[in-house]
Image: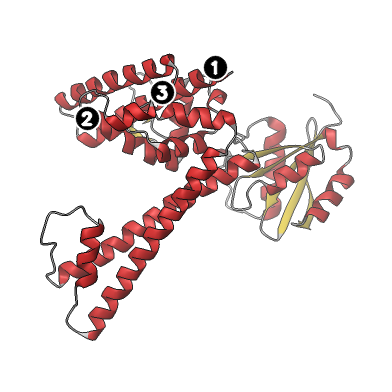
């Protein structure tokens, strides 16, 4: 190890950054105090610490994002954004301050005990923000619909026909209702206005998402199009998967990608007795949600519906072959696990975990075909 390298721990907050330095070799980390969280203060800190090429910085991933990471990288400083949940913690340590956190980060960075997260570029981060904004809007719309439906149910108003839930006919029926009492009618109008507003918001974000994908980098467009050859994976699902995983090739095998999504089994084994439980749920929750939603489609027999045939137009034969194999294998796995007495929820999670492996194979194959 180069004796001139300095390891810098940064405890980052909205307004301040606590700084600590650990020199190469042995010795405790020392605090350098707190600086304002501004580009000018960061630039002054880099000049104070010495040659940028001999600095190694790190800070925890959090609400402040990757702006500090990009500032340091632009000045030639090697920086890592580390996973907070994977930072070692001593059980007997009951004192937590910004200074101690910065010193701990500097020590652990020097010892190599920190796990860095993958940092997206600005374009990919923008796409991911758009995908998550649409997901948040869809969740708000679902809750608004539930509030309105429960209000009508309490008043004995039930849909008179088997219309598509929240379709145009259903909404027209809700608009024409009049509840007894001015207070309840005011609530109905407010809930209905919120449903209509959120419906328009979701549609607006979906249009923006479609336009963003159409003008994205060629590599992303290839992966999104290839993922749609799978059953149950449309444009929104494929874009969400591509935005959350980003570079599929950074996973050398499907297993680490499954762990990234939090769909591998937790384990607490000791001695000769293995103990495994449910999935860890410690990975990317956005990826896990769309993955399980897509996995439900494999309860149906293998086939090529019209929408799936249209999505496969122009796709490489090798990619379509992987998708066909996935459809046959996952449907058979669904039936086999269900016959063993497993609950549908557990079966779908197992199918979703394997589906993610097929997604990895298709994305890697698509990138090779496009190269």
> Mark 2 against mark 3, which lies toward the viewer?
2
The image shows residue 5, relative to residue 371, as above or below, that is: below
Q: Earlier in the sequence, mark 2 or mark 3?
A: 2
Q: Nearer the viewer, residue 339 or 206?
A: 206
Residue shown at the point (79%, 53%) measured from the top left: 39
How far across and how far down the image is residue 137, in percent? 42, 56
Residue shown at the point (64%, 39%) measured from the top left: 121
Residue shown at the point (29%, 61%) measured from the top left: 145
**Quadrant in the rendering for residue 53:** top right
CB contact under 8 Å: marks 2 and 3? no
Bin the neighbour count of mark 3 within 10 Å (Cα to Cα): few under 14, some 14-19, many 20 and up. Answer: some
What residue did someone put label 1 on?
368
Bin the neighbour count of mark 2 within 10 Å (Cα to Cα): few under 14, some 14-19, many 20 and up. Answer: some
Q: Nearer the viewer, residue 243 or 2?
A: 243
Residue 328, numbered label: none
What residue did someone put label 3 on?
357
**Quadrant of the frame with the N terminus:** top right
How far across and how far down the image is residue 322, in percent? 38, 17
How far across and how far down the image is residue 319, in percent? 42, 18
The image shows residue 8, relative to residue 359, as above or below, that is: below
| Residue 85 seen in this snapshot | no
Q: CA distance from mark 2 to mark 3?
A: 18 Å
CB contact under 8 Å: marks 2 and 1? no
Q: Earlier in the sequence, mark 2 or mark 1?
A: 2
What residue did someone put label 2 on?
299
């Amino acid at each position: 190890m180069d004796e001139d390298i300095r390891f810098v721990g940064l405890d980052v907050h909205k307004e301040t950054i606590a700084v600590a330095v650990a020199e190469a070799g042995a010795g405790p980390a020392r605090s350098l105090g707190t600086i304002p969280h501004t580009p000018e203060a960061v630039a002054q800190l880099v000049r104070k610490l010495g040659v940028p090429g001999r600095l190694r910085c790190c800070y925890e991933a959090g609400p402040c994002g990757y702006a500090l990471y990009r500032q340091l990288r632009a000045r030639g400083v090697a920086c890592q954004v580390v996973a907070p949940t994977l930072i070692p913690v001593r059980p007997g340590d009951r004192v937590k301050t910004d200074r101690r956190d910065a010193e701990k980060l500097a020590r652990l960075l020097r010892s190599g005990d920190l796990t860095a997260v993958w940092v997206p570029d600005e374009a990919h981060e923008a796409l991911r923000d758009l995908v998550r904004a649409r997901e948040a809007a869809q969740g708000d719309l679902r809750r608004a619909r539930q509030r309105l439906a429960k209000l009508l149910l309490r008043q004995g108003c039930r849909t008179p026909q088997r219309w598509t839930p929240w379709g145009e006919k259903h909404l027209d029926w809700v608009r024409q209702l009049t509840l007894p009492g001015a207070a309840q009618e005011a609530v109905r109008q407010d809930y209905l206005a919120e449903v209509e507003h959120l419906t328009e918001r979701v549609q607006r974000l979906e249009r923006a998402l479609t336009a963003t994908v159409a003008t994205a980098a060629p590599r992303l467009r290839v992966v999104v199009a290839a993922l749609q050859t799978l059953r149950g994976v449309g444009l929104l699902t494929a874009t969400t998967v591509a935005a959350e995983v980003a570079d599929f090739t950074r996973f050398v095998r499907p297993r680490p990608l499954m762990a990234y999504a939090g769909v591998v089994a937790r384990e607490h084994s000791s001695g000769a007795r293995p103990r495994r439980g449910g999935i860890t749920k410690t990975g990317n929750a956005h990826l896990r949600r769309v993955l399980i939603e897509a996995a439900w489609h494999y309860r149906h027999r293998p086939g090529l519906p019209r929408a799936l045939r249209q999505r496969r137009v122009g796709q490489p034969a090798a990619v379509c072959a992987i998708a066909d194999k996935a459809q046959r294998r996952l449907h058979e796995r669904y039936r086999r696990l269900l016959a063993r007495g497993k609950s549908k929820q557990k079966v779908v999670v197992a199918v979703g975990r394997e589906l993610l492996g097929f997604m990895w194979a298709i994305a890697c194959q698509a990138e090779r075909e496009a190269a």
